[in-house]
Structures are given as structure tokens and as C-alpha cells.
Amino acid sequence: MMKRILTLIAALFLLNTIAHAEILEPVSWTFSQKEVGDGEYELRFIAKIDKGWYVYAQGEQIDMGPVPTSFMFAESPDYEIVGDIEEKGKAIEGYDKFFDMEVKKFKRNARFFAKVKSDKPAFTVKGSLEFMTCNDSECLPPEEVPFKFNIIKGTKKSEGIATEGSEPLMAGKSDLLDPVKWDFDLKDLGDNVHEMIWYADIQDGWYVYSQDNSGEGPVPTSFTFKENEAVRFLEEGVREEGKIKDGIDPNFDMRVKKYANKIIFKRKVKLSDPNAEIEGELRFMTCDDKRCLPPEDVPFKFSASGKSGIVDLGAITGIDEERQNSIKSLVKDCDVGVVDDESNTEGKSYFTIFFLGFIGGFAALLTPCVFPMIPMTVSFFTKQSKNQSEGIKNALIYALSIIVIYVGLGYLVTVLFGAETMSELSTGVWFNLAFFVIFVVFAFSFFGFFEITLPSWIVNKSDQASDKGGLIGIFFMAFTLALVSFSCTGPIIGTLLVEAVSQGSNLGPVIGMTGFAIALALPFAVFAAFPGWMNSMPKSGGWLGTVKVVLGFIELIFALKFLSNADMVAQWGLLKRETFLVIWIILFVLMGAYLFTWFRFKYDTKIPFGKLGIGRWLTGGLSFLFALYLIPGLFCGNIGLVSGFPPPTFYAYSPCDSGVGYHAEGDDGHEGHIMDLEKAMAVAKKEGKPLMIDFTGWACVNCRKMEENVWTQSNVSEHLNEYVIASLYVDEKVKLPEEEHFKYMQGSKQKSVKTVGNKWSFLEFGCYKKLSQPYYVLLNENGELLGKPRGYTPDVDTYADFLEEGLAMYKDGKSLLHN
């Protein structure tokens, strides 16, 4: 996942990829392992590469060259790496026009072989590989693929797997894509001799691979059997029958043996005990002419005295439906399919992101990289055009090009991350720490310690393209502006994209960049239509540098929020509410002091205090006033303007009493929160009160806004006092006992439940198909719904009505679905 953070940064430096926002996955990986003797094992990493694409060979990274394929193995005393990693495949060595240098790369497939040595009977090899793929016109960002090999001595061959959280190695398998059906039978041949039979029914166009394949390409079908002294195999291996195809496979570009339509496997055994069972597992892989599904394991059991067939897959994969149902059973009205969130926060969230983007674009206009370009660009269009209408038209095209470029960047980020990943980012400790570092780097760039610039060759190529004239020329003029102004706009864009991504909103980056682009492009269009208005524009000067420094302070102020998120999720206790506010107060005081010229940075022009402009006076004065405004927050005072940004009042050295006492004395939790649903249900039954489930998060800004701005209002708090509230933190990192771990399917992805937060996240998704916080569910003591759940509801009266209606339904002995 961390690679996606690097991808976000890479997107800021590779703006020329924004036109290619479709999802491209031209490379898929499979892993396998083989015991070779003397305690050595061969690990195989096989890349299937789409036509026209390439994967680069191993080697040293060359400046401005492709990222070579590389492998990182986790250190372990259980094994050692033997020798270098070998590589095979259709290698091409020569000049690469994309990178303008000599390279070695593979097409269609690449195979890498590593050897490990161990004296352990069983051990695990973990690590990750990094690769880059390009075609003749574009490159995708470098990608990291985690891997894990579970190796058992005596097992000749098996498959490696992708570790949890990685992307699928091959085409994902969904409920609608199941082209192979298996059936088993045990035929009695007499004298305690039996024949095991495995039938595979294969859909048209799909294939299953023979046991007789090398393993360097597709995964061959294989069988493993559990040891049983009562079972004696009469044949050395498993026979196979069917219509075999022996030829070149387009997926692997190599000769393979495979079966279409159906295949039958057989093996004879003799049983010394007529009640003996034969258990094992078969592994197979299926492909059509364009794609492959991941290798699949099918457990089987044969019994001469009972039924033979497929073993429960849940027991093999760890998908524990019994454990899932036990958690869901806490809530009677779970997964009822008719419960829709009545709140409509997505539109409000999008408006906020758009507004932040617009403000960001306006701030970018006032930087020394962009502001001087406005009169020069507008003059160019008005003077070079044959008439005024043509000049206005060209300026409008220029402005629209700016919008297309930046919106394209936002769309690229949306495609790269996806909605689910964006939601996960907002609560990840390491992601929040990474964002904190990024913001600090941006701040110091604005302070003038260094500049974030793009490679000159990118700017030069764009500038050359702008000389072509016409629509293409105008577009590349706008593209050149985006590139040359990057040292000023880059940190603002990065801040906006990080904020949009961390909000977990699917279209957030696109909407944010739309606002940014409109604000940035608007002056070029307006002044081209009304050139006389340019006379009222302020002249460029030192004030533009001041704007950059102020933006640097704002970057640091926002950076602290991400550090606070990480601290609360991990429960380090390093940045509690008082510490956070003191640092903010210091930053606002420093910003005011800078604007009043009490200190300056290296490249600032010295301005006498008596000659300060009105802008410095106003902004500096507001900075000092805001610092004063924050001081009451140190002593439980109301600072509603920034609610949700500092840590909550209960995450403090001296926690504040919110006045909402909604659970019995002595229950686990903080400031009245019960943090366990079973305990909350027990309290609700004991006290004869309804229950409110509060799906929340330590790093949830909107949750803090609700608690500090809505829950504290008298008409809300009086209703809350009549509920027992279970605050379930979906990002709580406390580990569950190992016996309570389980897995479940979230859409097409398998998820693990190992922490308390995982458990509550499963409950929210499993019962209500929601992944966002806050999310409020009203229940009676039997777990029946007392109304439709709500999400973020900043309107006090609306939220009070929501609570009041639930109370009325409870007192009338009714529920939403069981009147």
C-alpha cells in the first residue's frame, strides 16, 4: 500500500500521464515453489505481460531510466538466500526510444528464479518484488507486489501467494466467473480395491492444465494426499483422461498441454480398513485465450462407507461464517436490505472539497510563479490574434485547457486509489505519518529552503509542442504553464489531493481539482474578454513571496492534523489536545510575527514596520486574534470554528466533561463511551433504555465535529442522556485473541478480522453495507431498528429529530421492521 503513496507523489511530477486515466493492468504475477534437494528450494516468480508491454530486467537504477525489477526478502533466521536471482524469458536488449538509452526488457513473459536453503521442516518466506512496465508511448508507475511462500519439507511443489492487502495476482474470481465445476466419486472394484475419480466440467472457451507441464508457465494440476496407514496406492500417480490440446498457449507464449470441456482424473487404492477415509487437496488453474484465474485449491474426501465429495471450503480458507454470524447476531435487524441512510452528506462533502480546491486555485494565482503570467499571457492572445473575438476565443481555449489538465490529474488519482482505498487511507497510521512528512516538505519549500521543480526536459518538450499553433499549441501553452509554475502550485496541489484522498470520497480528487482549475483559469478568460480590467490589478512584487510564506505556515498547520490522526489511531499519547493546540497557537503567533516583519526568511525584503501594507496588517492581526481564540480550548472552552481538527476533548491530559452522561458508572470506555457492543446491549437491557451504535474512528474529523458541535447542544444532549451509546471505533488497533480471528468477503476482496477495529468495521459493512464514519444506528434492547440510520448530520435540529423519533418509537414498543 505504501507504494500508492509514492505513486501520488509521482503523479505530481509526471503530469504528462494525466491523459491516460484508464485502469491499466498489463502485467499479472504468479508464484510457485519447488524442493530441489539438500534443503534447497526454488522460488519461481512468473510475469505474464500483455502484448506491446514490457517488464525491465534486474540491474542498477540508471538516472532517468526505467525502474529495474528487484526483490526484497524479509530477514529470517529460518532460511538463507542462495546465490543471485536468475531471470529467463524473451529478453530484448538494445535502444529504448522512450528512455533514450540502452536497456534490457522482457516481452510476453518474464520468469525469475530464487533459491533459499533451510534445515527447518516448515518455514515461510515473505517479501515483495518491485517492477515497472512500459509500452512504446507510456509507462505506469513502479508497482510493489508482496509475496509469501509457505514451505513444507517433502512437498515437491506448491504455489506462493500474495500477502493480504496486495492487488490480485491475476484476474479476480467473482461469483459470476466460475468456469470449472468439480465432482468426485469412489468406485468399488472388489477385494477392498477402489478407484478415486475426479470429474471437471469446463465451460466453453476455458481450459484446465495437465499435470504434465513444466510449471514455468501455467500452474499444472496437482494432487496431494494426507498420510493414512490404512490406504495403499496401487498406482504411482494420478491418470488423466480427456481431449488434450498440445500447443502454444497465447497467455504464456509457450507450448503447454491443456484440456477443454471436461477432464477426468483417476487413481486406484487398496484399503486395509473398510472405514478408512482418503483426504487431500487438488490444485488447478484455468484460463481462456485472454486471461487466467488464480490457482485454486479444492479439498476432497473419499470414504468407502459414506459420502465422498468436496470438503467445506470455509474450513480451508479461514472464512469463518459461524464467527461472522455470531457478531451479526448482536443486532437483530442486520443485513435486512431496506435500511438506507437518510443523511445526504456526500453532496455537502463534495461542495467542501470543491470550495477548498477553489480557494487553493485562488492562492496559487497569488504566487510569484503564476501571477506575473496573467498579463503576459492575455496580452499575447489579444495582440497575436487577428481580431478581438479571436483573441477571446483563444484565451477561453487556454483556460479550458488548464481545467482539462488539472481535472485530468484529479481523475488519475481517483483511478489509482479507488473509493475503498481512500477510505482506508484516512485511518492508516503510516499513511497519516507519510502525509505529515509530505506537508512539512511542502511548507519548507514555501519558506524558500529549496524548490520542488520538474526535470527540465519535460518542460522543454512541452514548450516545443506549444510552438505548433492551433488548438494543440494552445493546449501545450497551458501545459507549459502547469509545468513551469510547479514549484509554487505543486505543494498546493499536493495538499489538496492528499486532503481529498484522506476524506475517503470517491470523486473527491476530481472535484477538488475542478475547483482549483476553475479558480486558476478564470482570470485568463475574464481579462481576455475585458482587457481594460487588468489596469486595476496590483503589480507584481515582494508581496507575492509573502503569500508563499503564509502558505507555508498553513501547510504546517494542516500537517499537524495528520500527525494527530496517527497518534490517536496508534494511541501513542504523544499529541494530546493541549499539546496540539499549543503548537497551533505558536504557529499562528509566528505567522503574525512574520507578517509584522518581526522576523524574516533569507530571501525576504526588509520592510520597515511603519510601511506595512493593509494586507499584512489584516492578515497578521487575524493570525494573532486566532491564536487568542484557540487559548480557551486548552481549558475545555468552545472552539467550534476548528472542531474536528484538534484531538477530541476526551483525548487530553485533563479530559473535559461533555455533560452527556449516557452509561452506567464503571463501564469500560472514556467520557461516557462504551466501546463494546455486548456490554452496551447489557447496560441497555438492565436500565431499560434504547441503544445508539456510534460507528466512529479516532482519525474521523466529522465524528469530532458531531461530538463537539452537535452532541453538546441542549436539545441533543437531553435526548442522548436517554440512550445507551456504544462508540465502536473502526480504526481501533487493539488485537483480538487469536481464536477470534476470522476472514470475510468484502465485495470481491477477502478481509481479515484481527483487531477490535476490524471487528466493528465488519459489523458496519456486514449489517449496513457502509464503510463511512460517523454512522448512527438506533436500536431497542433486542437489536431491532428504531428508525433509519444516519451518517454525518451537522444540522442540530435534524439530528435532534432523529433521536426524538427513535425515542418515541421505543416508548411505543414499536420498531422500524417489527411494528
Image (tube, rainbow, N blue to C red):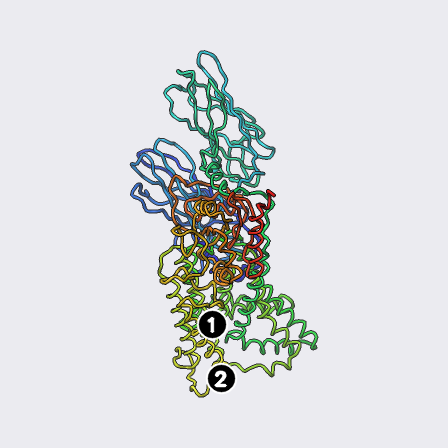
Quadrant that contains the C terminus: top right
Q: Is residue 594 visible?
A: yes
573 on left or right of 710: left
Image quadrant assignment for residue 148: top left
Mark 2 sits on what residue? 613
- Residue 783 drawn at (x, y percent): 52, 44
Q: Residues within 10 Å of mark 1 (few under 14, many from 20)?
A: many
Tally the numbered discs.
Answer: 2
Against 518, residue 104 (above or below) is above
Q: Residues within 10 Å of mark 2 (few under 14, many from 20)?
A: few
Against 774, residue 197 (above or below) is above
Q: In what element is the residue under mark 2?
A: loop
- Residue 403 drawn at (x, y percent): 60, 66
- Residue 721 drawn at (x, y percent): 48, 55
Q: Residue at x 57, y 64 (%)?
A: 354
Toward the viewer: 751 or 119? 751
Toward the viewer: 465 or 629? 629
- Residue 24 drawn at (x, y percent): 54, 50
Against 187, residue 782 (above or below) is below
Disc 1 from disc 2: Cα separation: 18 Å
Which amino acid type is marked by label 2? Gly
Q: Mark on residue 683?
A: none
| N-terminal label among 1 and 2 | 1
Toward the viewer: 432 or 481? 432
Q: In what element is the residue under mark 1?
A: helix
4 on left or right of 376: left
Which amino acid type is marked by label 1? Leu
Q: Is residue 405 visible?
A: no
Verify CB contact (< 8 Å) between mark 1 and mark 2: no
Mark 1 sits on what residue? 551
Q: Residue furthest bottom?
A: 610
